[in-house]
Image: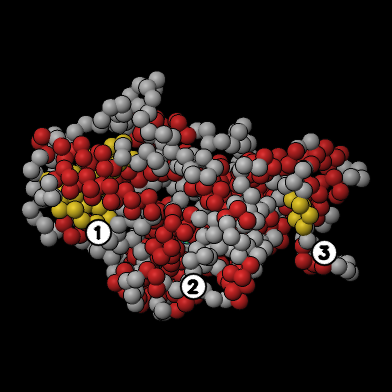
Amino acid sequence: MYLIYLFRRDLRISDNPIFHHLQKHPQFCHILPLYILPPNQIEVSGFLQDPSLESPYPQARSRLGKLRRCGPHRAKFLAESIWDLKESLKHRGSDLIVRVGRMEDVVGQILKQKEFQGKVGAVWMTKDWASEEVDEELRIERAVKEEGDGKIEWKVWDGEEMLLNDNDFPTSDPAQVPDVFTSFRKSFEPLRDNIRVSYCSNRSQLPPVPPNVPTQAAPFSISTSLEDFISSLQKPVQDCGLGPPILKPQGASTAHPFIGGETSAHERILHLLVSGNLSTYKDTRNGLLGEDFSTKLSAYLALGCVTARQINAYMVAFEDGKDLPDFGIRLNTEVNLSNAKGFGNGENKGTAAVRFELLWRDYMRLCMRKFGDGLFSIEGFRERSQSRGPEDVQYRKNKPNSDTSYHWSNLSSPETRYAFDRFIRGETGTGLIDASMRELALTGYTSNRTRQNCASFLAKWLGIDWRLGAEWYECMLIDHDVANNWGNWAYVAGVGNNPRGRDASGGAEGRKFNPVKQAWDYDHNGEYVKAWIAEFEGVPSGNDLGDGKQGWRDVLFQGWKVDDIFRHTKDKRERELREKLKRLEWVNRPLGKIRYQPKDQVQGKKGSDAKRGGTQRTRD
Ligand SMILES: Cc1cc2nc3c(=O)[nH]c(=O)nc-3n(C[C@H](O)[C@H](O)[C@H](O)COP(=O)(O)OP(=O)(O)OC[C@H]3O[C@@H](n4cnc5c(N)ncnc54)[C@H](O)[C@@H]3O)c2cc1C
């Protein structure tokens, strides 16, 4: 009997529920591991045998902004992850067959193949709760039932990609998931004791791939080397609508240089343990620059190259001073933990904080199950949540009747189009936002701290539909994950699970970040802003921002101040820099003048503007 295993966001061999349960199914003499690139989410025209041919599928573009759904950074990471899985499967006597097309069509084509008829015993895959994937699952089920005449087993396994297991929740009814994270978190304390162990068994050999697997259907063909595969994915999405290329500052280096795949995911975790970075995570996690201020595990988790409970298993062994679990991955990393900070000293605030963040990830997934398509509506979860805080009661009273009466503007207005285009290019005139948006466009990654600021800036300062921001992140982020991305955007916009983010009038004014204050707090020396905004080359930074150079820091965080601050300067270099900056549109005409003056600079100034940071919006 043959088994067809359809991979989706479970690109790993270890801690894999399907491979684990397979051990109890010796009837499968052959397994066909299959990864199908879905043309509605990933642009597949780069796989056309002849570039002059037209793809049978429409371009993979988002619903609102018609943005690319998977940009070049994630495309590369995905390709690497697929290739790593292919290599691991080959090493075990199997292989990964990659195809382009709608999943149900590809599966149907295989089941129709003469050599497969009567031989396929089952088609299995793991569960994904995002609504497109749920629909996809139903269509594949239909194809399996039709082609198999009801004789092929169709099974969707729990993906077990969360820290907690479905069976650990007090109820399996998603509607019972609390609307506020804190209530959810409290039911699993102490968290370390409530996490399931991962499957450690990892078979060294797998049944071979069946003979006569149908080739890729025309007009596509699948590249046979990783380089060609990456190029086929990236070529059609080089233009993501950013306009002229964004200047890369000299010396700027990505915070996420890591390649995709299960092997690198495990190597990354081992590095974090050996270097002691997990133990210091709580203190560094709000960092902006460098590889190690946070784990950079999100992209691996998003594609299922590693599971949250595997990360936990490594941390438990580390905390207990024991041997690390063996997941059967062939690693190139030497592991010597004896000198690692925190080794053998039990849970520390760093490892506890990583667990806490992973629990947020679980929570976002559960909310996606609970609210379904609400995740993609302008009102987010808000309309559907049962939360009854004072803001909600007031909100319901004032609730406008239709989507359009929300305060957010959309791309049908030329003013919004103009502002959105400048936002995604990192040309708003607010340093922290611009640095983050450019870092994102150039590398596919930006920190959690700046993601919060950018989301707040778009939804709350510019008043633009937060879903356009989520669509842009979906395109650009290396670690895009439906639940985490859309859930966090809704949260920051004030329509998710964030009671403090709401207000009574429509969600736009509750708890909003002041990105200038945030820059002062988290990028005190302006190093991050300077690292990603090429036009600031020559502006002093870091220690150079000492006495007398305060003005430059103001300029890094609020470019438009350059004229005010350096109007009368006699310094030749300052005059030249001022002139150079003044010629830039984003300096001259910032999208918003967000004011903030740190306490130590408010010298006897009266008025709330100086203290709190008032704003004046310029949308001309
Ligand atoms: C507007 C916005 C969009 C986001 N989009 C995504 C996304 O598409 N994919 C994604 O994985 N994360 C997203 N996040 C959450 C968070 O920013 C990233 O998980 C984190 O920055 C990834 O870097 P890291 O792995 O080094 O995180 P770490 O700080 O090392 O955290 C460890 C892990 O915990 C999880 N985690 C951390 N913060 C959150 C959070 N706020 N919500 C849910 N899980 C969290 C992630 O899996 C992460 O890998 C978003 C946050 C915001 C504010």
Classify mark 2: residues with Cα within 10 Å, few (<14), some (14-19) or many (20+).
Answer: few
Q: Amino acid at mark 1?
A: Trp
> Residues at badges 3 and 1 in contact (C-beta under 8 Å)?
no
596 lies above or below 350: above
Classify mark 1: residues with Cα within 10 Å, few (<14), some (14-19) or many (20+).
Answer: some
Q: Does residue 592 show up?
A: yes
Mark 3 vs ligand 1: CB below 8 Å: no
The structure residue drawn at horizontal position 38% and vertical position 58%, both measured from the top left corner, is 270
> Residues at badges 2 and 1 in contact (C-beta under 8 Å)?
no
Q: Pick whichever, 137 or 274, lies toward us.
A: 137
The structure residue drawn at horizontal position 58% and vertical position 46%, both measured from the top left corner, is 439
Q: Pick whichever, 467 or 96, lies toward us.
A: 467
Element carrying mark 2: loop
Q: Amino acid at mark 3?
A: Ala
Mark 1 vs ligand 1: CB below 8 Å: no
Residue assigned mark 1: 157
Which of disc 2 and disc 3 is earlier in sequence?
Answer: 2
Q: Quadrant of residue 226?
A: top left
Element carrying mark 1: strand
Element carrying mark 3: helix
Q: Quadrant of the C terminus?
A: top right
Residue assigned mark 2: 386
Residue assigned mark 3: 610
> Residues at badges 3 and 2 in contact (C-beta under 8 Å)?
no
Q: Residue 124: where, in percent of width, then height?
A: 21, 52
83 lies above or below 517: above
* Mark 2 or mark 1, whichever is nearer to me: 2
Q: Amino acid at mark 2?
A: Gln
Q: Which mark, residue 543?
A: none
The structure residue drawn at horizontal position 33% and vertical position 75%, both measured from the top left corner, is 171
* Mark 3 or mark 1, whichever is nearer to me: 1
